[in-house]
Amino acid sequence: MSIAGGVEKSPSRGASIHSTAMQIFVKNNNRWEGPPISGPQAAAFAAELKKTHIPIDHVFAHTCYLINLASTKPDIVEKSVNALVDELERCELLGIPGLVLHPGSHLGAGIDAGISQIADLCQQVIERTPNVRTRILMETVAGQGTNIGASFGEIGLLLKKIKNPKRMGVCLDTCHIFAAGYDIRSEDVYARTMDEFEREVGFKSLKAIHLNDSKHPLGSRKDRHEHIGKGHIGEEAFRLLLADSRMARIPMSLETDKDEDLKEDRENMATLYRLAKASYPP
């Protein structure tokens, strides 16, 4: 949901499509810095959530897209660390329990070096934010270029290297894992994929889910989101996921294209409600 006009405007936008969970940015998603969130803004955000009946535990945030903890460029590393600290502090002010982060792109240094650097820098960020409870949620990625996190093994290794489990977690993106080669389109392959997720990462670490279909085929390594049921993943995968009891209390968010009237969000929500055998409010 957009935070245009202030972060406190986002809950009413979520409520307008009958959402019970929501993802937001806590500042401009393409800038290193942004104006601070004031105390009155944070209070208004909490009041709006209460009014719209969206629990704060069902809200999570996404970092700006500039952050790259695996970068080989010292200035980008410094800016990334400072930006992540800032966004975690913003989330804490708002009471948001999780902040989704793309692990990073190693730019040719290699996956092992990238994972070690990401883990070390996350440890530094956690040490710089001792009074913050918000978790850093490592997002599964599609595997474009030198991006880290396309395999469950890479995500699991990152979590093992960071010694603060209470401050870490995972966000699973359906489009990304499909693009990375994990099939979820039928009951058998869905079960195998989720078994591997449990082995390599563990459902105890899963704190958020992005529900996106894919514009490109299985294993394409291309991160292009499509509306639910209209891409290469198809409806059955989402039906299986929504019926999976392990996902029952995990907040889920759409990241599909939409216009200002949110018509596309309503259509996707209606599809998801139908797949969950629930009635979407008119």
Image (tube, rainbow, N blue to C red):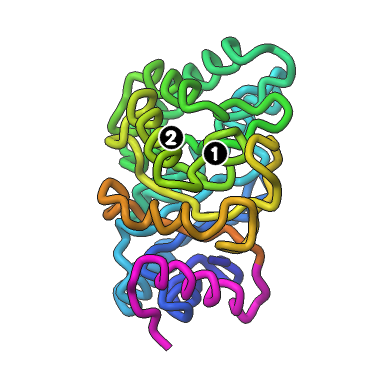
> Is 171 above or below relative to 143?
below
Look at the image and tell me in which quarter the C terminus lies.
bottom left
> Is 157 above or below relative to 173?
above
The dot on residue 84 is: none
Q: Earlier in the sequence, mark 2 or mark 1?
A: 1
Q: Position of residue 247 (x, y in %)?
A: 31, 50
Q: Left or right? Give the position of 237 relative to 234.
A: left
Instruction: Identify the element where label 1 is drawn.
Output: helix
Mark 1 lies on residue: 177
Q: What residue is at 68 percent from the left and 35 percent from the top?
A: 221
Q: Is residue 4 magenta?
A: no
Q: Is residue 276 magenta?
A: yes
How far, Cα to Cα, is label 2 from label 1?
9 Å
Q: Amino acid at mark 1?
A: Ile
Q: Left or right? Give the position of 175 relative to 120.
A: right
- Front one among 212 and 107: 212
Q: Position of residue 139 (x, y in %)?
A: 50, 38
The dot on residue 193 is: 2
Q: Position of residue 188 (x, y in %)?
A: 40, 40
Q: What residue is at 61 percent from the left and 32 percent from the top?
A: 80
The reply to whether residue 233 is in sight is yes
Q: CB of mark 2 within 8 Å of CB of mark 1?
A: yes
Q: Which residues are magenta?
A: 258-282
Instruction: State how many labels appear.
Output: 2
Instruction: Identify the element where label 2 is drawn.
Output: helix
- Front one among 5 and 279: 279
Neighbourhood count class around disc 1 (C-alpha, 10 Å): few under 14, some 14–19, many 20 upward: many
Location of residue 202 (image quadrant):
top left
Q: What residue is at 65 percent from the left and 43 percent from the top?
A: 65
> Is 101 above or below relative to 15?
above
